[in-house]
Amino acid sequence: DMQMTQSPSSLSASVGDRVTITCRASQGINEYLAWYQQKPGKVPTLLIYGASTLQSGVPSRFSGSGSGTDFTLTITSLQPEDVATYYCQKYNSAPFTFGPGTKVEI
Amino acid sequence: QMQLVESGGGVVQPGKSLRLSCEASGFNFRSFGIHWVRQAPGRGLEWVATISFDGGKRYYADSVKGRFTISRDNSINTVNLQMKSLRPEDTAIYYCTKDHSTTWQQIFDFWGQGTLVTVSS
C-alpha cells in the first residue's frame, strides 16, 4: 500500500512566523490530498482539500500547494491558536491513509 | 445544526465483539458517505472504514478487514460499525465522520466527538 510521510514530525516557531509542513506520497495522487488540524484535546477539523482549496471558515493564513507526490501546508503568520497537530490524508483511492502528523508548537 | 453522535464504546476483552453506532442529524444523511476514523491514545489518525451514501460500496483498512463491518440504515440516519475478534491494538477513540461532498470524495469535513473503545483483559 501507499505510504504518506510528513516532515518535520514537530516544530517550534514564534508568533508571526511563516511555517511550512511537507507531505509526501509514495505514489502519485494528483491533487487528491486533504489537510486536517487537531488542536490538543479536540476533534480534527478539515483545513484544505484538493491540495489547495480552503475549507469554508478556515483563515486565509492557511494555504496548500502541490500535486503528484509532494505537497505543502503553509501558515503565513503563525498565531497562538494554530498550536495543533496537522495531518495530511490521501483520498484518490482506498486506503484513505493519513500521514503521521506534524506537531506545531509556539 | 449538523451533528454526529457516536455511541457503543466501552471496555471489552480481547477476542470479543462490540458494535458502535453513529446517529446523524442536521443534514441530508442519505446523500453522504460516512466514514470511521480512529485514534489510539497519543497516536495519529487512522482511517478504518467507509460506506457510500446508499450502502452499496464499502471499504476497509487492511488492519480491520474481515473483522469489522460497516453498515447504514438511512431510515434512521444511523451508521454502525460491528467489530469482532477485537485486539488490544484496536484500542482507540473511534470517530464518525461525514463526507465533504455528495459525490463521495472521502474527504472528512465533519466529525463527531468520538467514542472510546478499550480492548483489555
Image: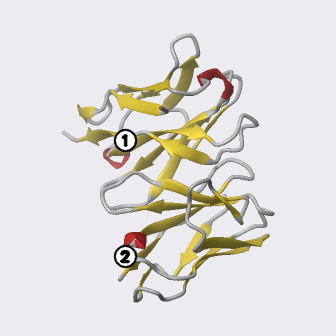
- The picture quadrant where one finds residue A75 is bottom right
Q: The disc numbered 2 marks a residue on which chain?
A: A
Q: The disc numbered 1 marks a residue on which chain?
A: B
Q: Residues within 10 Å of mark 1 (few under 14, many from 20)?
A: some
Callout 1: helix, strand or loop? loop
Position in image of residue B4 (x %, y %): 45, 32
At a point 56% along the width and 55% down the height, the residue shown is A57
The image shows residue B114, relative to residue B42, as above or below, that is above
Foreground residue, A94 or B76? B76
- The picture quadrant where one finds residue A51 is bottom right
Pointers 1 and 2 in contact (CB under 8 A)? no
Position in image of residue A77 (x %, y %): 52, 82
* Residue closest to the far top: B75
Visible in this render: residue A24?
no
Check disc 2 and report the residue beneath it. Answer: A80
At a point 45% along the width and 32% down the height, the residue shown is B3
With A87 as the anchor, is B52 left or right in this view?
Answer: right
Check disc 1 and report the residue beneath it. Answer: B113
Q: Amino acid at mark 2?
A: Pro
- Colour option used: secondary structure
